[in-house]
Structure formats: structure tokens, C-alpha cells
Amino acid sequence: MSFSILGTGKAVPEYVLTNDELSTMVETSDEWISTRTGIKRRHICKSETITELCIKASNEAMQNAGVSAKDLDLIICATLRGEYITPSQACVIQKELGATCPAFDINAACSGFIYALDVADGFFARGRVKKVLVIALDNLSNIVDWKDRNTCVLFGDGGGAAVLGEGDGLKYVEITAKGDTSVLQCPHGENTSPFYEHPSKPPYLYMNGPEVYKFAVVSMVRGIRNAIRKAGLTEEEIDWVIPHQANIRIIETAVSKLKIPSERFIRTISEYGNTSGGSCAIALADSVEKGLFKKGDNIVFCAFGAGLTTGSCVITWDKD
Ligand code: UT7
């Protein structure tokens, strides 16, 4: 027994930061950002906390699933930086929702949503749970160097949630990791111990864009192909692709290499930028909101990110 998705939700901050506004902050332009990345705007936290966004997405997902907090057997939050170092963001969410189940975080950066689905699958397989809440949400504006045009134009805040229930929707899921700290990392910042001997680095996101780009393109095509094959399907049988939204050019390269029509790839990057772990979860909730999926549709997800991690899975939509 695995799971089916019973309901989805999303939350992004109200404030919209446009490329034009960014162009007043660093030396960049709407033209550069649009053509190199496909991003037009992103939502950035001003008054909202990450917890408020997590609760909004969770409540929406639970309402759409017809499930209340007391029904939850497990909460998994995929985030690379919650409200606190400890407790976990999932425990903060549990408290705010009034749930009583176990709760923990997963840090797999942009692949976090798919990592969380894989972990949830194990709990269903062992018969330990009937209802699981997965939240994938990041607040990258908090760790971006707003003076670095190489990174600050790329990211946005927000994410989504999904309530999972016993079912056969998940057809295949796979996660990978290739330990690497050189091309994508964010240090903790100052170590306040009087005993610690190593220098501290500023707590900003550092990325070697072109190197990550190469990893991303290979991972995306390989991950999608592999997940489809392992699910016992062919590319022709795939109805929708939900790719990690890091750069529209990465998505278009995948389109050119796969036998899946371009219009079947969900693209949300122009509106939200790269929201890290939140990206696939937002794209899922957006698609459900728009009524894109019908019962029996095969949806393939694929993400990649810091770690370097990847995740891919195939889910058959089994809601009317
Ligand atoms: O989700 C986590 C995973 N992250 C990703 O998947 C991101 C993958 N990487 C990428 O999407 C792309 O590598 C970027 C969008 C980050 C960069 O695009 P690129 O085509 O690889 O550009 P580049 O880094 O090679 O830079 C090209 C030029 C440079 O100028 P010079 O050296 O050629 O004179 C940069 O300094 O563009 C310059 N540049 C900018 N110019 C205007 C870099 N950022 C900007 C900017 N505005 N914001």
C-alpha cells in the first residue's frame, strides 16, 4: 500500500518583486533576467513568516482533502531553513495546527518535496500511517545576498502542501544525492563559540550557475526518463510533467529531448522564480487549482538542487 494525493494547497507572500524593481537594486535588466531564466517576478516575504505560509498552505491542503489536524498521523516539512534551528519547522506546524502526530523536517533543498514523498511512502508501506501532511516551503530571500546579481534575481519565497492518504497513486519514486559543497551552498554564518578555530563565512547562498545548470539538464532528462520507465510507462503515456522551476531554459531543454508535448510541461517560473523545495509543490497546487488534472492522468515530477540532490516520481491522479 502506498499513497494517493487527497488535497493540495500553496502559499506565497503578498509582495511581488518585479525584474524592473530588481534592476534598481543591482546591475541587471528585465531583458537579461527574462531571456536567461524565464523569471518575470517573484514573491518575497515582508510581513509574513515562514510559519504563517506553511500554515496557510497546510490549511488549504487539508480543506481540499476533507481532513482535519486530528486525522494526521505524520507531518513532514521539506525546508532548508525553518523558523528555528530547533525545534523543527514540522513541530512548529504541528503546534499551530493543533495536531498531535510525529513531525520532522527534511533538508534536501530543491528536491525536498520529492524526498518527503519518498519518506512518506515508507511510512505507508509499513502500515504506520493513514494520513500524512507534507509541506515543502522555503524562504530563500532570507539567505540570498541582495548585492549579488548572480543569485538574487533567481529566487522567490513560498511553497505548497499536500495531504496524502492510503492509495495506489504513487507509481514510482526515486531520490539521489551526490555530495558536493563546491557549486551550491549556504554556510550557517557566525559560530559564536569562543573555542571554535575556523573562520566563519557570511550566511549567503553561493552558486556556480553554469556548473549547476549542467547538472540540472542531465538530471532532469535522466530523472524523468528513468521514473517513467520504472513506473512501467512510456513517455507517450505521460499526461503532465511537473519539473523543478529553476530556469525556463532547463525545462525547454528537457522538452526538446523527451517525447512529451511541450504544453504538458507545467511552467510557473515566470510568476514565482525559483522557490527551491517549494517549487514542485506550488506547481502541483496551481495545476490542481486550474483543474488541469483528470482522474487517471499520469504526472511525472522531477527536481534537482543543492546536495547535489535529485528526486523524481510518477503519480497517477486518482481524484475526480
Ligand atoms: O534550484 C537550484 C538549482 N539552480 C539552478 O538550477 C540554476 C542553474 N543555473 C542557471 O540557471 C544559470 O546558470 C544562471 C541563470 C544562474 C546564469 O545564466 P548563464 O547563462 O549561465 O550566465 P553566466 O553565469 O554564464 O553569466 C553570463 C554573463 C556574465 O557576464 P560576463 O562574464 O559574460 O561579462 C555574468 O556576469 O551574465 C552576467 N550576469 C548578469 N547580467 C545581468 C549574471 N547575472 C546577471 C544578471 N543581470 N542578473
Image (cartoon, rainbow, N blue to C red):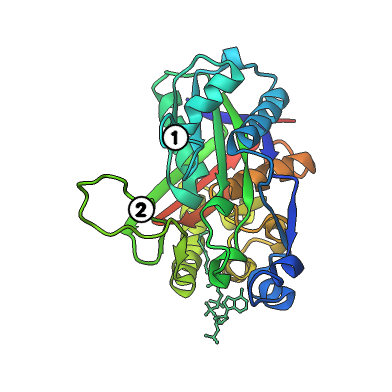
Kindly identify the residue that appears in the image at 57 percent across and 42 percent down: 137
Q: Earlier in the sequence, mark 1 or mark 2?
A: 1
Residue 241: x %, y % from top left: 63, 53
Residue that label 2 marks: 177
The kind of residue tagged 2 is Ala
Front in this rendered view, residue 198 or 236: 198
Which of the four quarters of the rendered structure image does ligand 1 lie in?
bottom right
Front in this rendered view, residue 79 or 143: 143
Q: Secondary structure at mark 2?
A: strand
User: Which disc number belongs to residue 309?
Assistant: none
Q: Secondary structure at mark 1?
A: strand
Kindly identify the residue that appears in the image at 57 percent across and 24 percent down: 165
The kind of residue tagged 1 is Asp
**Mark 2, residues whose alpha carbon is within 10 Å: few (<14), some, or many (≥20)?**
some
Q: Is residue 266 left or right of residue 168?
A: right
Front in this rendered view, residue 123 or 21: 21
Kindly identify the residue that appears in the image at 58 percent across and 49 percent down: 300
- Outermost residue toward the right in this view: 290
Task: Give the CA separation, mark 1 to mark 2.
Answer: 17 Å
Residue that label 1 marks: 105
Q: Is residue 299 visible?
A: no
